[in-house]
Amino acid sequence: MVAKSTFNREFVLQRRDLALIRVLFESRVMNLAHVTALFFSSRPEAAKKRLQILKRLGLIATRPRLANRPAVLELARQGLLLLDSEGILPEYPQLGLAALERRTQVGNLTVRHELEVMDVKVAFHSALGDFSDASLTDFSTWPLLYQFEVGTAGSNARRVLVKPDGYIQIVTAAGAPSGVEHHFFLELDRSTESLDTLVSKAALYLSHYRSGGFAARNGVPRSRFREFPFRVLFVLKSAERRNNLGERLLAHSP
């Protein structure tokens, strides 16, 4: 438990405000375009006005930037306290206020990657808005929530910690009373890793599936792993790199 929030209680907190702050807590950074698409039905002026209020209350902040660069939003300490006072922080790993504050302090080299992950989230959100029989029920961008350990094969077998860039869940009705769940892990490639590294990472996800790790995460015995399939989405910078990775994956065994 962290200290109680002391923000102005005369402010009328909207459910949308809390949802926005929660997403910013998970993603660490967002920009105006992300906020507008996710929470304001593509109405940037409405988004700007609400963000100004949240900034004045000390719930969110703008990262230092050059004059010609777009603003990048981050969570302020008061925003963390608000999430705790609303009973939301206990839903996440209990790291303590100091650790959570350190997590919000994203290095300059990491910001661009985090923003690109949010670009993918917005793309999914926008695309699924056109489908009445599908809904985006989860898109988490905090690796800690869905990371996993898996063993490698061969003479140098070892345990490897895999930290996905995102976890996505889409539910389609497809005539079923409770809907059908589709699970995805996201790997955002910035062309800084070799294709061999990406192929090795794909093999780790395959091992996670076959070992029953994902099934166990969903509360069933590992032996029932076939009932819990998932896809891994590699988002790449160019069609050429996509094709090259595809060729490497097809040539890989398994």
Image: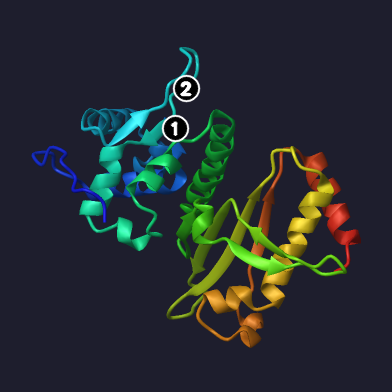
Q: Which residue has dot 2 on it?
A: 70
Mark with earlier residue (1, 2): 1
Type of amino acid at the residue the image marks with label 1 = Asn
Type of amino acid at the residue the image marks with label 2 = Pro
Q: Which mark is residue 251?
A: none
**From this viewpoint, which residue is outermost toward the top?**
67
Camera-side residue: 50 or 42?
50
Query: Residue 28 location, x and y as percent?
Result: 44, 41
**From this viewpoint, which residue is outermost toward the right?**
251
Query: Residue 233 location, x and y as percent?
Result: 66, 55
Q: Residues within 10 Å of mark 2 (few under 14, many from 20)?
A: few
Tell me if label 1 and label 2 are in contact, CB under 8 Å: yes
Question: Is residue 71 positioned above or below 117 on the image?
Answer: above
Q: Which mark is residue 31?
A: 1
How far apart are the alpha carbons under marks 1 and 2? 8 Å
The C terminus: image quadrant: bottom right
**What is the secondary structure assignment of the residue under circle 1?**
loop
Query: Residue 138 location, x and y as percent?
Result: 46, 60
The residue positioned 42% from the left and 26% from the top of the image is 63
Position of 229 compared to 2: left or right? right
Question: Is residue 192 positioned above or below 204 on the image?
Answer: above
The N terminus: image quadrant: bottom left
The residue positioned 69% from the left and 51% from the top of the image is 234
